[in-house]
Amino acid sequence: MSIGELIADLRKARGWSQGRLASAVNGAFGTNLDREYISRWERSKVTPGPYYLRCLSAVLDVPLAVLEGEVKRRTFLTDVAATAIAPAVASDLLSAGFAARLTDGPSADGWEAKLATYGTEYMSLGAADIQRRVTGELVVVQQQLDTPQLWSVAARLMTLYAKTFPGSDGSRAVNWYRAAARAADESGDDHTRVWVRGRAAIALGYEGASLGIADVLADQAMAISDKPSLGLLNATMGKAHAAAVRGDRATARQLMRQGRRVFDAVASAEQTSDYAVPWWRMNVFVSLLAARLGDEDAAVRAQDAARRELPAVLPRFATHLELHRGLMLARSGDRTGGVAYARTALDGLPREKHSLTLRLLMAEVERS
């Protein structure tokens, strides 16, 4: 995707015309852009310079490094190799990668089994543990990208890897989500294409970070297929959270109702996998969304419903619910009490169980 295509996607996700985008930049930075100039950017007739990239980053709510990364146009495999090797021992990873190429590596069924295991472990392990292990898997799978199914595996692994970085970290999480979407497109499987984008959208929307990218990925998922699926559910709820964080309550509520209808059609029986959305997890989504909207009754109902069915083996998600309650208190006017309530809940969870998302939620409570 070119920088022009990305600007157009981000603009359309906001529902803005080219003139509206020009006015937003002019109003924020005192520039003198017009609609035609935006059109020239989007058609790749002109590439925005560093100053205008900073302007666009601010008004479209996307990390500057993502826009700069599009200008550099690094290839997918170069991104994977350069980024994934950094956290681990390079020699061991290179050895594993070459071995996979020479011996064909794990079978497609073997990779699906690995993904199922990671989906379960993500729910209880810390981000650092998952990141370290998935790093090695990415180096191996990139040597096997010879079939659509293995592109699907790679896309889902990359989505999991992205989630080990907070969305507020800027380019790292977002670049991995967008690379995962490109890998999913290589698979040709619409289910994977929708799921990867939807999972990224709910992750970013829930964290309240990189909302422009959350909207773009959610819109892409919805455009690929409107058939009820967990990917569509995640996309809808991710877009709802982005709207709530921006203060667009009407849109957030409409999307929440839409998400409930999708959930009614695709709710998961599996309780402890990141690839599932059972009743308790849907209520975790709704709990935070209602807290952000100031709807205390709906938030409390969702929290109580989630607690009744939340598996005891997932204490981190119980802490999520307590932080949502702290956010409610802070938003209702008792900032000191809300922060204290949330801090007590977070401190009560063993530190090795903490996630990056929990820390972002704590920061949101403190800002309220």
Image (tube, rainbow, N blue to C red):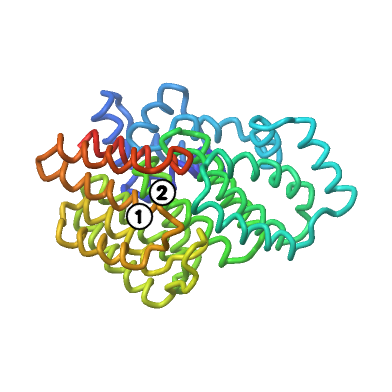
* Contact? badges 2 and 1 (CB < 8 Å): yes
Q: Is residue 259 left or right of residue 234?
A: left
Mark 2 element type? helix
Pick out the residue farthest to the left.
Answer: 333
Q: Is residue 85 left or right of residue 22?
A: right
Residue at 60% over, 30% down = 72
Image quadrant holding the N terminus, namely: top right
Q: Is residue 249 positioned above or below 127 on the image?
A: below
- Residue 239: numbered disc: 1
Question: According to the image, label 2 marks what residue?
Answer: 214
Amino acid type at mark 2: Ala
Q: Residues within 10 Å of mark 2 (few under 14, many from 20)?
A: many
* Residue 299 figure quarter: bottom left
Q: Position of residue 365 (x, y in %)?
A: 25, 39
Q: Position of residue 236 (x, y in %)?
A: 37, 61
Pick out the residue farthest to the bottom.
Answer: 265
Image quadrant holding the C terminus, namely: top left
Q: Residues within 10 Å of mark 1 (few under 14, many from 20)?
A: many
For marks 2 and 1 on the same chain, the one whose residue lies earlier in the sequence: 2
Q: Position of residue 211 (x, y in %)?
A: 36, 44
